[in-house]
Structures are given as structure tokens and as C-alpha cells.
Image (cartoon, rainbow, N blue to C red):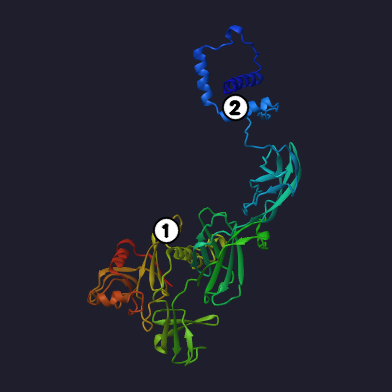
Amino acid sequence: MSKWKSRLSILLAVLVMVSMTGTSVLAFDDAQAEPDPADAAAVQAQDEEIDADVLTEDVDAVEEGVPAEEELTLDEGEDPGVIEVAGGTISSETTTIADIEKQTYTGKAIEPDLTVTFTQEGETIQLNEGTDYSVTYKNNTNPGTATATVTGAGEYSGSVSANFTIAAEAPAAVKKLNALPGLGAIKLTWTKVDGANYYYIERRIAGKKKVDRTRITSAKETKSCSWENAYKIDSKKTYEYTIYAVKTVDGQDTAAQLQKRSGNDKLSKGTTAKTKTVQRMVITVTMKQTVGPLKAGKAYKTEGFGGGQFRIKYGKKTYHVSRLKTKNRKAAYNKNGKYSREAVEFFMNGGSTWAKGKAYSYVKKNKVKTSKKYLIWVNTYNQHVYLLQKKSGKWACIDDWKCSMGKKDTPSPTGHKKIVKKMRHRPGHGAPYWNFITWTSKGNTGTALHGIQPSARSSWIKSLGQLASHGCIRNPDEKAEWIMDHCKKGTTVIIF
């Protein structure tokens, strides 16, 4: 029986193949009813490779008249692991839009990529934009809540929406903020902040909370920015400036609109700097006796010194008072201070955005005229000498160093002077390189910018930056020598 079952199994297999391929069935010839012995051995080998139990079940099924299980057929290229959901209605019940990340404000419409899934009859698939749905956006430019709406396409209908947030990030804080003192004006300079549309500046008197001046300035510069403040500047007060980089988020771009400061605008952290205008040393004296309206026993601030007399401004007049008629002289200056070279140039040349720089340029305001190549400024407040050179029509600061001016009881002359005489070595004095700014032939005496006394080198060098001399202006030897070799007679020396 097993032999016939084996042969019947082979026959069934052939019939299945014929039915699947459509091949015609050929009857066996009587002469071929008995297989060749060699073929019989091959069939026997094939029988051993076939699962006997399966064949038996198939044969039993045929014998009992039970039809075999219908076989699933697939279209060409179809993945048997994917079940296709053929269309449907997009709604909040069937469709999910994955959470949309918070977006950063750019000033332009924002359209983030979406992930949309559709669920029907327990099966979930991911939909494709353009084929299965289209997307529209609303309120997707300015900071706030934006909306993305998915609308079905192709075999899908209906729609569903999801919200997302657009947030404006504040720009970075301003860096390298400098407050440059000038003549009746202060100039702010700073490095441009990437992404900033403008800068908001607050001014207050140092130590006060109240803001007494605000300013908006654009951010058109490529590398550095600046602003010059000359409005109601009091030279006696220290001003504190706080600057914010601002990113505009509502499209406003005119100065008048920016002054309103939209609540959506993003401000960086504030950066602060403070300074006074350029200062000069002030010597206060008490009168020994009454001179005009100047009462004995009262103290007065002097405007300067020259010719052995203090200049005291009282009302609209200036009085020249002999040093002998004063007492208790006090000097207010900064022993360790220094103005940057950029500030020196601002002080001398003035600004560029208001009054054409005329009102706040020391040189122009005081009508300092010189045909010489160099200009020397001795700053009495910081005890510093600044050397300037004329370049492209403006004075550029090329060097600076500490000096020592006359003590409060023997002050150096102030005002505008010129180099009138030079001596490399002065008879009777050890200090070298004498560049006289005053000279009296009768007594062979005068006031000069000179070098260091060799016999007192250590103490003289140590005293640079302080009031120490008897009226002359002490300088390091190499600086005094440079003035002698390069600054011709007639070079202007400003002592202020």
C-alpha cells in the first residue's frame, strides 16, 4: 500500500503543477506503464526526501474527498508583509500628526516637515505628503502659535490640524563696549552682534536708578558700531550707559516705530560702561586776603596757572591771583588713570554725526592751529603725555606715557604753549633733553618737558604719574629725547 501511496503522491504533485502552469496532460503509453528500473531507483530516492506524514495527509484528504486549502496568490512585486489600507477619511479620530518641535523665529514663513499616520480597522500606516494629503499653514511667520492643517488627497478625504510654537530667541549680549570721554561728549563703541536689528541704549547718572536718556541706533554696520552722546552732558557727572542688542519680530524698521519698542522684540542681556567727559586737574585754593569779589578765608577752584598766578573764574570774569595770596592748595587728579588712544583722538578731532564735529573737537573749538607734523597733549588730570601726528586731515595718537607735573604749590603752567627752545644738556642740571615751552632770557629759566635726573633716577621714575616737580614736566629719557629729535620748534603743546 505504501508503494501505491508514494506513486499516487507523485501523480498528485504533477497534477498540481499542470493546473498551475496550464500544461496539457499527456496519457501514459501502455509501453511505459512499467517504469525503467533506473527510474524506479530515482523515484525511490525522491520518496525518501519527501515528508511521509505530509504526503499521507494529502493523500488521505484526496481519498476522503476533502478539497485542499486554497493557496494565497500575490501580485508581482507585492510585499507579503505589508497590508494596504485603501483610502479613508482623515479626522482627529483616524489621523495623528506627530508633535511638532518648537520653531525659531526667522522673520520668514516657517513650514516644518510633518509626520502623519492613519489608522483604520486596527491597521496604521504613514501617509505621504503630495500623494495622500496636502498641508496649509496659518500664523506661521511671527512668534506665537502657528497652525498646520492636513487635507486629504487621492483616496483620502477630510482634514485635521495641529498647532506648533514659534519663539524668537534673544540675540547675544553686546561685547567690547567702550565709553570714550570727549570734550562735552561721550562716544560709545562696541562690536556688532549677529542677528541684531538695532540697539537700545539707556543713559543714567552713575548711582541713580532713573534713566534720563534713551536712544535707538540701527545695526547696519558690518563689524563695529558707535553712538555719540552730546545731549545735556555735565562734565562734573559720571554717566552710565547700558546697551541691549535687539531682534525685531514684527517687521518694524523705522526709527519712529522702533521707539515704541514692541513687546515682542527680544532684548539681549544688558552690557554697561560708564565714564565722564575728559577731565583736567583742578587745584583749589583758599584766599589769604580779599581780591575783588574773592573773599579772604573762602576756597575757590582755579581754572589754571600761569605766570606765577592762579586763574579763578568768578561770575563772568576771570581773576589772576598771585600764589602768595593763597593758601591750603589742594589738587584733584587721578594718579593711576589713562585715556585710551581712541578717546584721545575723539577728544581732539570731535565726532562725525553731530555738528560736523566742530562743537566737540578740542582743536576746532579752541582754534588750535599748527603747521607742524606733531601735536603734544599733556593731560593734567591723568598725568599723561599724548603724542599725536597729523594723518589724512586728523590727529592720530601714536604714543603715550606717564609724566610728572608741578606740585600743587608749584604747579606747571596750563593752556596752549609751543616749543621755543631746546637743550640736550642744561648747565647746572643733570636731567637731559630740555624742550622748553616757556623761556625767560633774563634769568635763563623756563618750563620744559625734560628727562630724568640721573642722581635721583629711582625716585623720579617712581613718581611718574604724580605731581612731583617744581613746575616742569618730567618724562622718561627716551620720550624726552624723541621729542627733541622729532618735534621742531613751534610744535604746539596743549596742557589741559
Q: Quadrant of residue 491?
A: bottom left
Q: Residue at x 56, y 72 (%)?
A: 233
Q: Is residue 43 left or right of residue 103?
A: left
Q: Is residue 70 left or right of residue 476?
A: right
Q: Is residue 429 positioned above or below 38 on the image?
A: below
Q: Quadrant of residue 30?
A: top right
**Where residue 421 is drawn, which disc sits there?**
none
Q: Is residue 237 positioned above or below 399 on the image?
A: below
Measure the C-alpha gap from mark 1 to mark 2: 112 Å
Tag nearer the camera, 1 or 2? 2
Residue 194 placement (x, y as % from top left): 54, 55
Residue 317 placement (x, y as % from top left): 53, 81
Q: Residue at x 42, y 58 (%)?
A: 390
Q: Is residue 422 positioned above or below 167 on the image?
A: below
Q: Amino acid at mark 2?
A: Leu
Would residue 194 be seen by someone viewing this image from the given angle?
yes
Local secondary structure at mark 1: strand
Would residue 76 be seen by someone viewing this image from the given angle?
no
Q: Nearer the viewer, residue 116 or 282?
A: 116
Q: Nearer the viewer, residue 274 or 10?
A: 10
Residue 161 placement (x, y as % from top left): 73, 49
- Residue that label 1 marks: 390
Q: Residue at x 59, y 72 (%)?
A: 232
Q: Residue at x 55, y 62 (%)?
A: 227
- Residue that label 2 marks: 55
